[in-house]
Each structure stands twice: as C-alpha cells, then as structure tokens.
C-alpha cells in the first residue's frame, strides 16, 4: 500500500467531493445525472425553483437533512480529521459536500464551498446563516424570518456563486501539497483548483476513477477513499 510523505513545512489543501459522501451512503445530483430521488435539479436546486415553489424545495431539503442526520462518517472522513489534529493550521479542508460528515468525524478547519445542509438563511435580509436541523415538510408551513422574508436552505444552488472563493484561493496560494478526493473534476470552479495549485504544489488525486482533469495531477491513487486514505495519510508518514 502506498503512502504520502509530508515535510514538516508542508501546507496541505484537501478538496473533497461527492465520492467521499457516497461512501457513507449519501449521493448528490452531481453524481446522479441530475435526477435524484425523482427530483430534477431545475425543480428544487436553482433560484428559479425557489421562487416558483419553495414548499417543494423545502420538502426536498428536509429529506436530505433526514438522510444526512442518519449517515455516519467513513474511514476517509476520520483519516482527514486525524491528520488535521496533527497539522493544525497547516491543514485546510475545502468540501463540495453539504452534509456534516466531516464535522461528525471531528474536522474543524473546514470550508463548505457549496453551503451547509444544516444551516438556513433569510432570502431577503442580511441576517447571517444559522444552524437549523428542522424539517419543513407538509403540513408544516414555510419558515419565515422576523423581517418577513422567507428562510431558505444555506445551499449554493446551480447558477449561484460558491461561498468563500477568496478564502479558498488564499489557501491554495499557501499550499505545498494539494489532494483532491472523490471529486469528478468536471464541476467548476473546483475543477480549476488543481491547476491553480499545480504552479507551486505537488498535486494528488484519490478516488475510484480517474478524474476528467487527471492531467493536472502528479500522482493518482485509484480506489475507495475510505480504503486508501487511512494508509495514505497515516500520521507516521508525516
Ligand atoms: Zn430576514
């Protein structure tokens, strides 16, 4: 089994994608061809869908909350959390996943570029996103903000700009080792992160299939993240 070696001065940037959640039994639109649980992207995961039928949108995200609440982190999540405990501020985790499995595994230095399933925010005022585990399914009504606006899922929908790109690119500039895990390399802007990092960092991919941007990686490890990462990231290799 191969392993990665780290220098004491390395700064690690980890990008995780749908494959990591899928190994815990959670799938997403992005890896299911746009149709998920009989819902279409354009009906529940776009700003237009929200304006057209917020009840349907909340019905969909309530189901997602229920599924994610029951899911457990897998060995890939746990290996990343263990590595963070060792590297501390030299570790940055950027995830495209909206579930909280990284947090359940103990990750703290984490950025959810596509939002968080267990947060909501007002669609009208500047009230910051807040923790929200509620299910808004019929016959429950739509949640409302004190300003009168509608409370929406804190999710980056298709057609919206991912969160915290400044913070992400600052971390990419700092990194000396870039590791993409279980992400297809087709969804922008995340697919371009490897190109940005490659100018100054070693780039590594871990996942079951080669990503579509595989030419950007110095090393590719094919297999399940939950099976490969515990050894690849073993603390003894730092
Ligand atoms: Zn409001």
Image: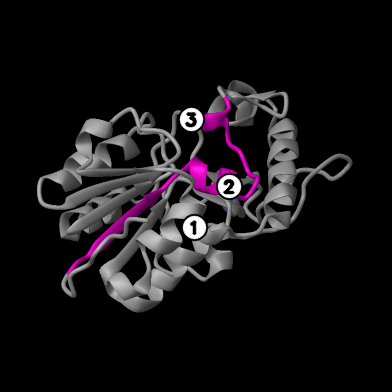
Asked whether residue 15 is drawn in magenta, I would say yes
The residues bearing labels 2 and 3 have C-alpha atoms spaced at a distance of 24 Å
Asked whether residue 29 is drawn in magenta, I would say yes
Residue sitting at x 28%, y 31%: 213
Secondary structure at numbered mark 2: loop
Q: Which residue is mark 1?
A: 76
The answer to whether the residue bearing label 1 lies less than 8 angstroms from the nearest atom of ligand 1 is: no
The answer to whether the residue bearing label 3 lies less than 8 angstroms from the nearest atom of ligand 1 is: no
Q: Which residue is mark 3?
A: 158
Compared to residue 51, the image places residue 99 above or below, namely: below
Q: Residue 52 appears at what percent x and percent y?
A: 66, 24
Residue sitting at x 43%, y 34%: 160
Q: Which one is nearer the viewer's eye here, 223 or 68?
A: 223
The residues bearing labels 1 and 2 have C-alpha atoms spaced at a distance of 9 Å
- Disc nearest the viewer among 3 and 1: 1
Q: Which one is nearer the viewer's eye here, 151 or 9?
A: 9
Left or right of 52 on screen, residue 18: left
Residue sitting at x 17%, y 59%: 176
Q: Residues within 10 Å of mark 2 (few under 14, many from 20)?
A: some
Whether tag 1 and tag 2 are in contact, CB under 8 A, the answer is yes
Q: Earlier in the sequence, mark 2 or mark 3?
A: 2
Q: Which span is picked out in magenta?
A: 10-32
Q: Farthest residue in the front direction? A: 1
Q: Residues within 10 Å of mark 3 (few under 14, many from 20)?
A: some
In terms of image quadrants, where is residue 119? Answer: bottom right
Compared to residue 188, the image places residue 207 above or below, namely: below
Q: On the rendered image, what quadrant is the C terminus found in? A: bottom left
Q: On the rendered image, what quadrant is the N terminus found in? A: bottom left
Q: Which residue is mark 2?
A: 23
Q: Residue 211 appears at what percent x and percent y?
A: 35, 32
Q: Farthest residue in the right direction? A: 139
């Amino acid at each position: 089994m191969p392993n990665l070696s780290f220098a004491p001065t390395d700064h690690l940037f980890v990008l995780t994608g749908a494959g990591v959640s899928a190994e815990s039994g959670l799938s997403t639109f992005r890896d299911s061809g746009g149709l998920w649980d009989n819902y279409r992207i354009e009906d529940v995961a776009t700003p237009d869908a929200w304006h057209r039928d917020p009840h349907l949108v909340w019905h969909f995200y309530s189901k997602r909350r229920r599924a994610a609440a029951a899911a457990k982190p897998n060995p890939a999540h746990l290996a990343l959390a263990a590595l963070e405990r060792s590297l501390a501020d030299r570790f940055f985790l950027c995830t495209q996943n909206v579930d909280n499995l990284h947090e359940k595994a103990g990750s703290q230095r984490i950025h959810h570029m596509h939002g968080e399933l267990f947060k909501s925010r007002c669609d009208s005022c500047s009230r910051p996103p807040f923790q929200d585990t509620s299910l808004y399914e019929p016959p429950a009504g739509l949640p409302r903000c004190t300003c009168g606006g509608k409370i929406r899922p804190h999710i980056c929908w298709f057609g919206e700009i991912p969160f915290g790109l400044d913070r992400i690119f600052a971390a990419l500039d700092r990194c000396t080792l870039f590791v993409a895990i279980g992400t297809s390399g087709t969804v922008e802007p995340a697919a371009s992160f490897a190109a940005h990092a490659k100018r100054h960092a070693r780039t590594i991919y871990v996942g079951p299939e080669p990503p579509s941007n595989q030419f950007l990686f110095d090393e590719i490890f094919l297999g399940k993240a939950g099976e490969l990462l515990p050894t690849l990231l073993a603390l003894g290799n730092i």
